[in-house]
Each structure stands twice: as C-alpha cells, then as structure tokens.
Amino acid sequence: MPVSSTTRRNTRRCLTLGLVGALAVATGPVHPATAAAPTTPRPSTATGATVANPVVAGPIARTTPVGDPGHGYPFLATDVNLAAAGYVEEEFFLFGTATRYAVQGTQNATTLGTDQPYGTRLVVRRPANTTKFNGVVIAEWNNVSNQWDQEVDWFQSHEHLIRSGYAWVGVSAQRAGLHSATGLKAWSPTRYGPLDVTVGGTVTDDSLSYDIFSQAVKAVRNPTGVDPLGKLPAPQYVIATGHSQSAGRLANYYNGVQQSANVLDAVVLHGGGGVLRTDLTTPVFRINSEGDVASGILPAAARAQADSPALRSWEVAGASHGDWKLITDYGPLRKRDIGSYPGGYPGEPQTCTLPSLSRVPQHMVQNAVYDHTVAWVARQVAPPSAPPIQTTTTTPPAIARDDLGLALGGIRLAQHQVPLRVNSGSNTGPGFCFLDGSSVPLTDAQLATRYPTVGAYVDASVAATLAAADAGYLPASFTRDPAWYSDLRYLIAEYVAAGRITEYVAARLTDRLQRAEQAGTAGNAARAGELLAQLADRARQRITGDPAARDAVLRPTEALIALLHAADRRNR
C-alpha cells in the first residue's frame, strides 16, 4: 500500500529536531512587555478541514534558460542565488473545483456557486533541506495591479526570509494575473495554457480567488499527492501576506472566509486593507507607509481601529507605497520578462515632480513584522504597539510635518529621524508617482548645519537605530540587511556622476564595500567593521578636494561601523 505524503511528512517531522530553536531564531528577542510568555511553540489550530485539496502537478520543468524568449521558465523567476543560500525555486500547477464567494464588509462571505473548475499556479522558494527550515510558510497573494503577477513582499523581504529559514509560496489567485493581455497565459501560452480561473470565460470577476487561495494553502499544509514543499516537514504555521490590492483581497478573505476555512495562522496586510471584523481570534498585522496614510490607500476607518489581542497596526514615517527597495529589486526582472523598467528605476527618465521612491528602509520593519507574527501565533507573544503617523486632518488625510517636511509620529527609523535626505510618502506626477513617494538629498549647507561633525551624525543615527531595534521595530538581525551597503554604493555612484568623486577613488572605496557586504550579510560583524574602517580611511586620504563629499561618504560608513560594533558586543 503506498505511503501518503501526510504520513511521510509526519515521519519527517518526528525526525526533524530543533524546531523550537529554529522558531526562536525566527522570532528574535522577546519584547520586554511579554518576556514571561511561554517559549514552547503551541500547535497550530488552523486545520483547513473544510477546504478541498487540489490536484498538484509539478515541479513544472524549465524548457528554456531564464530570460530566453521562449519563456519556458517561471514568470519573474528569481535572480537571487538561491543555491548558494541552500534554497530552491520550483513552480507547481493546481487543479480543482472551487466555490465562488461574494465578500462584503465585515460579514461572512455569501456563496455564489460551487464546484467551479480552475487551474492556477504557485511558486515555491524553500530551503533545500530540513535543517534550515524554520517551520513557517509565508504565503503571498500575488499582486496584479500591473496586470501581471508581482510578488511584492518577496522582493521586500527575501533576504530576511532566506536568512531566517522561512519557506515562501506565491499564489496566482486572480484573473488579471493569468488572463490579462500581459498575464501568464499571454506571456507563455505553451507553459501556462492549461491554467484558467474564469471557468472558460464565464466568470468575469475574482469571486473564485478566495477559495483558490485557501486550496493553495491547503496544498502546502496537507497535500494528498505531490508535495510542494518537497522533503520538508509539514509547516507548523502558515502566514498569509499581500501588498496593496492584495492586502485588500486578504482583508476581504479575513472578514468573509477565514472563519470557515481556518487554514491560516495569521495574516499580514502590507500597504492597505480595509476595516476588519473584531470577533475573530486569528492575528492580523497591518504595516503601512506614510504614503498609504497620505493617499488614503489605508482608509480612515481602518486606521481608527485600535490595537487589540488580534490586531496590530504599524505605520512607518517617511516610507512610500512603492519604494526604492522594491523597485531596485524588481526592476531587472521586469525588464527581463516584460521589457521595461518600472518608474523611478535608477538611470531611467524621472517623470515625477520630485525624485521618486522613498529610501526609508521600511522592508526592515516588515521583516520584524513577520518575526513578531510567528512569535504571536507560536508563543502568544503579542507584538509591541507603535505610535501612528500624525495628521492634521483625516478627510482628506494630511500629514503633520516639521520644518524640513518630514512626517511626524509613526515608527521613525534613523533614515527619517536623522535624515540625509528628505524622504516622503507623497509625490505628484503621472502614473504611480502618487504611490512612489519622494527622496530629495539635503544640500551640503543643510548637512553641515545639522551635523557640524561626522560624529554628530553617527551618534544620533546609531542611537535612533538601536532605539528602533530595542522597541522591536527592527529584527534582531538588522545589521545583516544588504540595504546598509547598497545605500552607500548608490551614494558613491551619485557623487561620481556629479563629478565630486573620481572613478578611480570610487573603485577603491567600492572594493572594500563589496567585501564588507559579504562579511556583514553573512553575520561576521567584526570583519565587516574592519573593512568599512579601511573604506573610511581611504575616503579621508583620497577625497581631499571636496570635504563635503568626503563627509557624505564618512557619515553612513562610520554609522554602520558603530552599529556593527554594537551588534558584535550584543552577540558575545
């Protein structure tokens, strides 16, 4: 008699040791307010018992190299070196019959029809073996606002997810992602031809998407045939995540479907999501940017919902709906698979009124959100609350700002609290300018006035960063984030383009920066600090004719050195 995948998984779970330790790594330090909470993970109560199991096919073979015009590979296949990190990327097709739901407000969903055939896909990026897996799956509802699948939350948080041992699953639940003129079926008729979420064109809305998402999660939690997680044990917890339109869909799902489906352990709503019902116990974590508040993407009524045992809401000052991290990570893949870069991508024509894309690293806060959510469901450790961004009016929303134009209130990372640039969630211009925010460098005179010495900036910046980490707004591993290094790389390039640093000097600075990044992102804080100290010495010695340019390089370099030293001391 064949052994079922569930039996195999249960056997593997018994053989896989150290899950409690892995979850402790994923969740980071316990917040002081909840330090007495239990550390033993509690079993998930999300059974998904009423959710149907789809038929899973795959992994779907790659018939062409990535980037080949034949498109015989997964759309937006990652360019991250997964193999070096001990991860794999695989694509699967799901086939089954789903229920159509109408979801309205905070009421239970209404059934519109049953037994509707569908076919869709999911992409899995997971640890290659059990020793790295932390037991948690992040299931992303792919965003289709551009009329194709876009995994925003993967782009924002993939470094942290990989570093912490999460598995990520991207679900294609909506019509536009498959059936639009730029959707999967048009992109590769050969590869994606069998997929259909419209019942042959007769369903012209997204009423099937909710049950499709439930079944995709069920296929990961408790497969009956092909296991999308391969040889990994069954996940202990599944956390749904979605950005913008997908956050709205997941809010609808939470209100109307989760209670009956009971297939999720928690939901993360990133950049939107409406009013949530208050009679459910499934945790929901909202993370929104200043731009989400300013634009009304996060409705006033949703903002007014107070934190509760099942709800946390964080707002990040200076951050934008679409930001620098998203566009610089996503841009090369969009160019490869769609043929154009997104607006604001470095080197592309700027069409917004102000230089677009906030550089406040909201993704680091988002990384903390995932870790807190795991602790919430696994150990009942409630995340810390955070102050909201201040507004002068709510309808329409108007952000309260200081004399420099910086938003007041909210989670205030050093890049906002101790600025080198005026980052805002707002901008004007065509297309998505209103979502992309802005980032305007301070002038030499402004910087000299605010920070009379490099040390004045370093002290204030380090204090703000450590305060955010101590408050729980940054993950324990925040110094390993590559954004610290890429921001410095872009800054050096900007000064080269302006003719203020020579290419010869820049090459010698970026040589040390590259080596420091390799050490720092790998967790070797001491070595990264040594290499950055060498970079700082070279800047002092070689940038001699432009003290302002020299100090511009030294400020973030010396601040990162101090943060690395602090991290090294804390880890001893």
Image: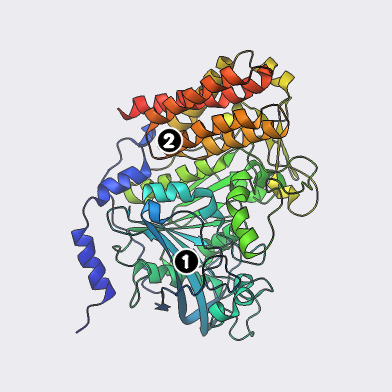
Kindly tell me whether residue 166 is visible in this rendering: no
Classify mark 2: helix, strand or loop: helix
Res 444 quadrant in image: top right
Classify mark 1: helix, strand or loop: strand
From the top left corner, tell me how far across and down residue 194 is, in percent. Answer: 53, 83
**Which residue is outermost to the top?**
452
From the top left corner, tell me how far across and down residue 67 is, in percent. Answer: 57, 65
Pick the residue in front: 50 or 319: 319
The answer to whether residue 111 is left or right of residue 131 is right
Q: Amino acid at mark 1?
A: Val
Q: Residues within 10 Å of mark 2 (few under 14, many from 20)?
A: many
Q: Amino acid at mark 2?
A: Gly
Which disc number belongs to residue 224? none
Q: Is residue 350 above or below residue 122?
A: above
Contact check, label 1 and label 2, Cβ < 8 Å: no
Q: Nearer the viewer, mark 1 or mark 2?
A: 2
Q: Which residue is mark 1?
A: 123
Q: Quadrant of the N terminus?
A: bottom left
Pick the residue in front: 446 or 86: 86
Which residue is found at the position 29% from the left and 66% from the top?
Answer: 231
Q: Which residue is mark 2?
A: 520
